Image (cartoon, rainbow, N blue to C red):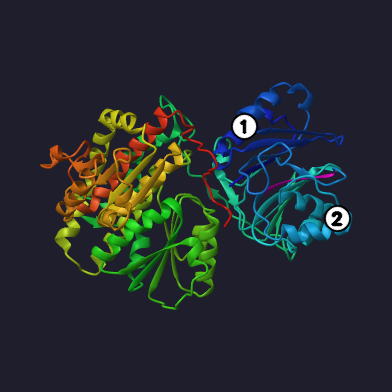
Amino acid sequence: MCGIFAYIWDKNATNFLVNWLRNLEYRGYDSAWLCIINNTWDYYLEKSIWKVSNLASKIDKIQRDIEWYNTWIAHTRWATHGWVNEENCHPHYSENKRFFIVHNWIIENYIELKIKLESNWVKFYWDTDSEVIAKLIENEFDTDLETTIKKITKKITWAYALAVIDKNNPELLVWAKIGSPLVLWFWQKEFFLSSDPNALKESCDNFIPLEDWEIVVIKNKTFNIFNLDNKILEKNKVELEKSDEDNWLWDFKHYMLKEIYEIPEVLKRSLAWRIDFDKKEITNKTLEELNSKKINKIEIVASGTSYNAGLTAASWFEELADIETQVYVSTEFKYKKHFINKKTLYVFISQSWETADSLECLKIVKNKWWNTFWIVNSVGSSIARLTDMWLYTHSWVEIGVASTKAFIGQLWVLLLMALSLWNARNLDYFKFKLIIENLESLDSKLKTILDNSDSIKFLSEKYSVFKNMFFLGRNLLFPIALEWSLKLKEITYHHSEAYSAWELKHWPLSLIDENFPTILINPISKLQEKNISTLKEIQAREGKVIWVLTENDKHKQEFDDSIEIPKTIEELNPFLVATALDLFAYYMALYLWKEIDKPRNLAKSVTVE
């Protein structure tokens, strides 16, 4: 959720610290702040609610006053506990104002800890779980800050990334983590710590990812990484994957639109070195290892958009690879009964490396020594290192909260897995070759949709007046209906529902009238004719229908409006439909004057259950 950052050196870091916070803002934009100290024990603290730009305006006025402060901690907040106001904004500090802390994720037993501290006459002033940590450090202080942090981490339940500075020791900075991601980068005597490698990409090319129960101590221009047994650890650096264009909008109005237009390039990147299009072969060592496992069942665990990607993939795994597949929401999988089967593959899908609920599920499976596979976008992810096998989507950083290119990247990797398993089982090689051939030309068809977006833009404006909308699809395209119902809710705040097209008559049909339009996803497929009857049922009740159809479809005159996609084989329709409906949701939000990249109440990463 939140983005946290720390920096220690002798130079004034104000300007680039604010830029780093902007790089983290997509993780939370309820408030932002920074706290800095200098060698004479002075401290400066500034807070602002909402965007980082509000904080930047305040800092600009006092630049000269903080020129010689050398230890910095900063934070962008997505509120989990307490109102969005300056009082609940980090940093939190001890009563004696000696210790200042930043914190990401959540403390589940904070009420219990708070009650015990209050019994010792400790006073609390705010509503957050994070304040408990600051007061706990002061109450439990033992010899030095490093020893105290190791002591209190044993008392905190669940996950956190925690940074602490001591006003009386301005050359000291201590970080600890469990569950929540944390990375370190250093250059000579200059040190950076962040909850997200994305914040570092303007300054470095690599980083050190930290594991659970590890503590970083930066002291007197040197650093060490310890475990809880006080053993010094040697850690390897990981290359930071980045695109020079990640943080530039160029001529685009929003990151979401820019990221939609990056989808064709993400396709090329995701499939590069994984498919030999000349030989019609998949060439990937990870997938070769997967094929050696003799898998007879797949269980997919994911949340939100990644869950919808998993639902789409389930059809591919069953129809193409002939493998039974089930899909679970992460938080439900965690508490269900698990049946041991060493031939089951557990596939976890995440845009980031820190989806809390999925990470907890992974730990359950790993404890039983079952086969695990992770699909993730973040190179160097600690989640990937915990699994037996993984593939990166290589979608670059996605800043818009509503996922577009990252979702498509997940679909491509999942399809690649299904094709590889299919080919290894010697199932219908001619169909396998046909899909590979059509994948090769898919990027040009995606560009056709993007180059002809004006018609979608027109429809978005026309239908932006409606407060309710249905998304309907069947088979492979039902999860796409779910995903773009979600998208519309995320960025327009309008109500939408998604159903299998045939389910409409079971009860949702009662909602249909002239004010409740439907997007019926129905390009050429084996179920297209069956969906015609759903169209007729809606029209008989004066409902308006936008049909997502294949170009030159013979049924084009039977509905109110249409979104056309280029012709491809049925298995690849999800990619084209998803891209077209990305544009539809974006332009509708644009006409409604919504905050598209940072929709209210949402953040890019979900780090609490």
Among all residues in the image, which is located at the extreme left? Answer: 554
Q: Which disc number belongs to residue 52? A: 1
Gap in angstroms between the C-alphas marked 1 and 2: 32 Å
Residue 60 in the figure: left or right of residue 496: right
Q: Which of 439 and 60 is in front in this view?
A: 60
Residue 147 picture location, percent across and down? 81, 58
* Overall secondary structure of the magenta section: strand
Residue 142 picture location, percent across and down? 86, 58
Query: Could you classify mark 1 by the number of other residues whose Cα lies within 10 Å: few (under 14), some (14-19), or many (20 or more)?
Result: many
Which residue is painted at 31% across and 50% down in the image? 510
Q: Nearer the viewer, residue 367 or 551?
A: 551
- Judged from the image, the secondary structure of the residue bearing numbered disc 2 is helix
Residue type highlighted by circle 1 = Val
- Judged from the image, the secondary structure of the residue bearing numbered disc 1 is helix
Q: Can residue 295 be seen in this view?
A: no
Residue 30 picture location, percent across and down? 61, 38
Residue 277 in the figure: left or right of residue 198: left
Residue type highlighted by circle 2 = Asn
Q: Is residue 79 visible?
A: yes
| Residue receiving disc 2 | 139
Query: Could you classify mark 2 by the number of other residues whose Cα lies within 10 Å: few (under 14), some (14-19), or many (20 or more)?
Result: some
Residue 5 in the figure: left or right of residue 382: right
Magenta range is 98-103
Q: Which disc number belongs to residue 180? A: none
Residue 229 belongs to the span the image colors magenta: no
Q: Nearer the viewer, residue 339 or 562?
A: 562
Residue 101 belongs to the span the image colors magenta: yes
Which residue is painted at 74% across and 64% down in the image? 154
Q: In the displayed structure, would residue 464 be above or below residue 113?
A: above
Check whether the beta carbons of the residues at disc 1 and disc 2 lie within 8 A of each other: no
Q: In the displayed structure, would residue 159 be above or below residue 250?
A: below
